Amino acid sequence: GNSVTQMEGPVTLSEEAFLTINCTYTATGYPSLFWYVQYPGEGLQLLLKATKADDKGSNKGFEATYRKETTSFHLEKGSVQVSDSAVYFCARGRGNEKLTFGTGTRLTIIP
Amino acid sequence: GAVVSQHPSRVICKSGTSVKIECRSLDFQATTMFWYRQFPKQSLMLMATSNEGSKATYEQGVEKDKFLINHASLTLSTLTVTSAHPEDSSFYICSARDPGGGNEQFFGPGTRLTVL
């Protein structure tokens, strides 16, 4: 079946550090790929998405590139801020299918 | 982007009572809504898919008589936790699919249920 494997956390970084959160997906069909962010006590917000191979999604300094050859969609940010502390979820979905989520990665940025 | 609201945001109830949670799409019509449950420090678990005008589709292991879902209109789905018990305490999140937005799902802010 469809699945998403996400880097386990928690991840703790210093402010201005470089961030990578790994995500790989099963390549059944041609899914769209998503990164969602969940701030404490809130629901999920779409951070970025990519709908086809080689697409790059970007938002708020975060980027992820849809890599078909490695079935990956790693999340990166060049310089993290304290306000980026949250839980990040990688997900895949196709057409009218339900979304399949990774387990989530808790990120904590310390000043 | 599209907005999905949930009400209430937080509810505390006594064991044995029923609790209704509303999920509304505010600026689009959603033929499909989803209900998720999230345990502390864990990922989202899809409970059911709510289809307007028809019965909900429940995931394996989710009791449909325990978690009643009604999707009576294109902008409203409700989840009723019947005869709630402390183990039902959780964070419940809904999402709504926007057919005019490439079928993208938009999530509500969640409802924190605490059963005493």
Image: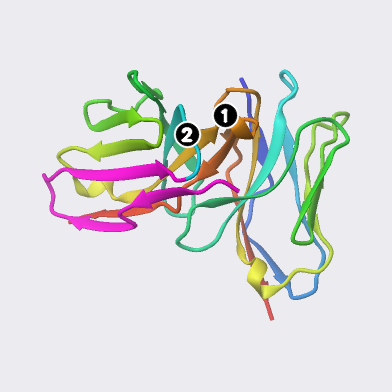
Subunit of label 1: B
* Residue A100 spot, x, y in % from top left: 58, 32
- Going by the picture, which residue comes out furthest to the front? B27
The chain letter under disc 2 is B
Count the labels in the image: 2
- Residue count near mark 2 (Cα–Cα under 10 Å), binned few <14, some 14–19, many ≥20: some
Q: Are marks 2 and 1 in contact (CB under 8 Å)?
A: yes
Q: Residue furthest bottom?
A: A111
Left or right of residue A91: residue B63: left
Q: As rendered, which of B24 and A39 lies closer to the eye? A: B24
For label 1, the SS is helix
Residue that badge 2 annotates: B29
Q: Which mark is residue B99?
A: 1
Depicted A25 relative to depicted A106: above or below: above
Closer to the camera in the image, B73 or A31: B73
Q: Residue at x 54, y 50 (%)?
A: A44
Q: Is residue B36 magenta?
A: no
SS label for mark 2: loop
In this picture, which residue range is highlighted in magenta?
B1-26
